[in-house]
Amino acid sequence: MSSTMRPSPTSSSAAATSCVSATPGKYGYVPPGACNSYYDFSPSFALAIAFSVLFGSVTLLHTFQAVRYKKGFCWVMIMGGIWETVSFIGRALGAHDQQSSTYATISQLLLLLSPLWVNAFAYMVLGRMIYYYLPEKKIYGIKAASLAKYFVCADIFSFIIQGVGGSMTSSVTDTSIVMTGIHIYMGGIGAQELFILTFTALVITFHRRMIAVRQQGRETAGRTGWLRLTITLYLVLALITARIVYRLIEYARGTTASNPLPFHEVYLYVLDAAPMLIAIFIFNVSHPGHKLVGPDSSFPHLSRKQKKALKAEKKERKAAEKEARKGTGKGQWWPIGNRKEASLPYTELEVQYATPKGR
């Protein structure tokens, strides 16, 4: 079961029929083998308070930075910080009320899922870096905005899987449901790591292309800081990966006495809470809003009316291209402008209507 919230029936294959309820001691503590145990250890109130304060502090700083730099997409990181903060507040409350399944469940679920917000923020930052720094504003023919959306959707997919698995582990009466939930959650974080590895390959590609752009003298004047932000992404992705590896090892080795990870709270703080705290703080120190400033620092935003006009323009252009092909019989694909102009990431109408709003 999970490292913080384990119903006693899951302590072994026979526990579901042999566990007994114990008389709660101070703060509701009962041994992990008891039926009315929600923890594999006695949670530390002091550590929970300390990490609540730390996560709360970096979250408040992110909120201030989002307002200062006018970057609306930073709400994603703020949500991750809030979830981590609430998780440890719940853990602190649960430390003094260990018979409360509500505190245990809320604390555990938010702890398991909050890193996905940090992950999504990293995806969104790279998309904006590609749009801001690369002259072509795309990688492998994929527009920067689309690339960010694809990875955020992948993150949501992983989020749903992990959420389903994490919620199933809160079962106190059915060991089979708990184990199924663990397997589903492991599948979810496995998928998350697969997406991270793919994303890391794109970060490396961006890094190499920016080196080439600099060597060719194609850098846009005044747009600095790309290397600092790239290193920031490498560090954050490494920390998230370390946390995922810890969770995979923890669950893969089972919940028997031979696996110390679920039964010692220190592992959770060192290998889960601390890496995520550092990852969030790194984005405080190297905030994208400090470097992504001015034109192209945000994706263009079109109103519904402007999107309809753009769609109509594209439809007319395709019709003109089709007529041109029929007329020449030789495939004259680009009757308006030339191929180079037509391959730009946004049409003239998009540029005319684009109004960046910190997205």
Image: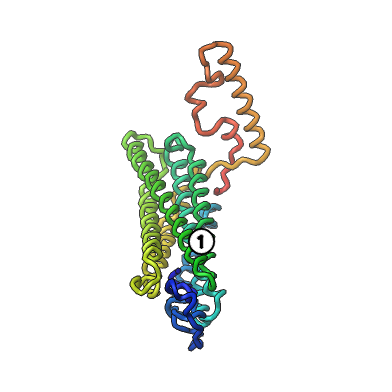
Residue that lies at the very extreme toward the right in this rendered image: 305
> How far across and how far down the image is residue 295, in percent?
51, 42
Residue shown at the point (39%, 61%) measured from the top left: 248
Q: Nearer the viewer, residue 179 or 298?
A: 179
Q: Nearer the viewer, residue 307 or 18?
A: 18
How many other residues sit within 10 Å of disc 1, few (<14), some (14-19) or many (≥20)?
Answer: many
In the displayed structure, 245 sits above or below 170; it is: above
> How far across and how far down the image is residue 95, in percent?
49, 80
Going by the numbered disc 1, the residue's amino acid type is Gly
In the displayed structure, 229 sits above or below 136; it is: below
Residue corresponding to mark 1: 165
Residue 225 in sight in this render? no
Q: Provide the secondary structure element on which disc 1 rests.
A: helix
Q: Nearer the viewer, residue 125 or 176?
A: 176
Q: Nearer the viewer, residue 57 or 26?
A: 26
Color scheme of the displayed model = rainbow
Residue that lies at the very extreme toward the left in this rendered image: 215
Residue shown at the point (60%, 28%) measured from the top left: 314
Q: Quadrant of the N terminus?
A: bottom left
Residue 292 in sight in this render? yes
Residue shown at the point (49%, 23%) measured from the top left: 339
Residue that lies at the very extreme toward the top in this rendered image: 328
Residue shown at the point (40%, 70%) measured from the top left: 255
**Quarter of the figure with residue 262:** bottom left
> How far across and how far down the image is residue 26, in percent?
48, 88
Q: Is residue 320 left or right of residue 169?
A: right
> How far across and how far down the image is residue 219, in percent?
38, 38
